[in-house]
Image (cartoon, helix red, strand yellow):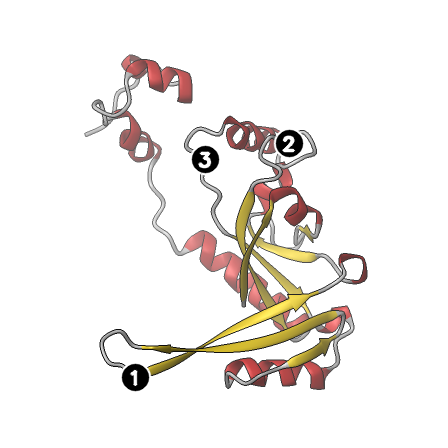
Amino acid sequence: MHKRFWPYDKLANISETIPEIQRDLLSEHAGEMDRFLSGGEFTFFSEVILCSDLAANGAEYDAITSLRVAVQQKQNFNGWVGPFKFATKGYELKSKEDERKKDNVQTVYMDFDVAKTAKFLRIDGNHRLSAVNENSTYKDAAIPFCLLLFNGASETDKFCRALFHNINTKQIPLKDEENLSVIIESVDVFSDDDLQLLYGIIVNLISFAK
C-alpha cells in the first residue's frame, strides 16, 4: 500500500471505475458533487482508494514476489516490476520513551509512465473523481490517495469486491433527521441565514422527531 497526494484532475485521468462493483453514477449526482466541491465552503478532500493489478501491467511473478518479500521484511529493493520502477528506503526511529527501542520505517518510491500502464481502478472515491472536469475550480487541489498493488486478476477482483463492501456497509448509517440535526440544532454556530445560504434549508419548516 502506498500513500501520497496528487491533483484532483490528474488522479481522475489516471484512474477509472470498476463497472462490476461500482454503483451507477447519476449525472445529476455528479453535477451536485461538482457544485459542492466548487463551493469551497466546508469542503474536505478525503482519501481516495485506488488499486492496480501488477500482472495485468506485464509484471512477472518473480519480480512481484521479490518486491513483496522486500517490503514485508523491510529489506532494500531497487528495480522494475513490469512498467513500475520501485525503490525502498528504510529509516531507523528511536523510541522517545526508551532510546534502546528502535523501529524501522520503510518508504517505498514508485515511478512510472502513465502512457505505458493500465489505468488504476477506483475502489473508493469514484463519484468524487467522476465529478471533476477541466472547468472545476478545485481541479488542481491536491488530495490524499492510497494505492493498493495486487498480484493478479483473481486477487484484484477478490480484494476490490471485499473492500468496496466493507467500506460501504460496515458503518452505521445516520437517519436524515440525525444528519440534519447536527447542523440545524447548533443554533450558536449557524444562523438561519447561514443555513438558507449554505444548505438551502428553511429551518422553520422542518420539525424533527425527538
Of 161 and 73, nearer the camera is 73
Q: Earlier in the sequence, mark 1 or mark 3?
A: 3
Q: Which mark is residue 27?
A: 2
The type of residue carrying mark 3 is Thr
Q: Identify the secondary structure beneath mark 2.
A: helix
Amino acid type, callout 2 = Ser
| Circle 1 SS class | loop
**Residue assigned mark 1:** 101
C-alpha separation, residue under disc 1 versus residue under disc 2: 54 Å
Of labels 3 and 2, earlier in sequence is 2
In front: mark 1 or mark 3? 1
- Residue at (54, 80) in percent of width and height: 71
Residue 43 in picture, x, y percent from top left: 45, 35
Mark 2 and mark 3 in contact (Cβ < 8 Å)? Answer: no
Picture layout, residue 121 above or below residue 95? above
Marks 3/2: CA–CA distance? 21 Å
- Among the 4 quarters of the image, the one containing residue 148: bottom right
Question: Mark number for residue 78?
Answer: none
The answer to whether residue 23 of the structure is visible from this angle is: no
Q: Is residue 182 above or below residue 130?
A: above
> Would you say the residues marked 1 and 3 are in contact, meaning their CB atoms lie under 8 Å apart?
no
From the top left corner, tell me how far across and down residue 87 is, in percent.
Answer: 63, 75
The residue where tag 3 is placed is 43
Residue 1 is drawn in which quadrant?
bottom right
User: For the residue marked with disc 1, what is the amino acid?
Assistant: Lys
**Mark toward the viewer: 3 or 2:** 3
Q: Earlier in the sequence, mark 1 or mark 2?
A: 2
- Spot the residue most to the front: 99
Decide: few, some or many residues near mark 3? Use Cα within 10 Å; few <14, some 14-19, many ≥20: few
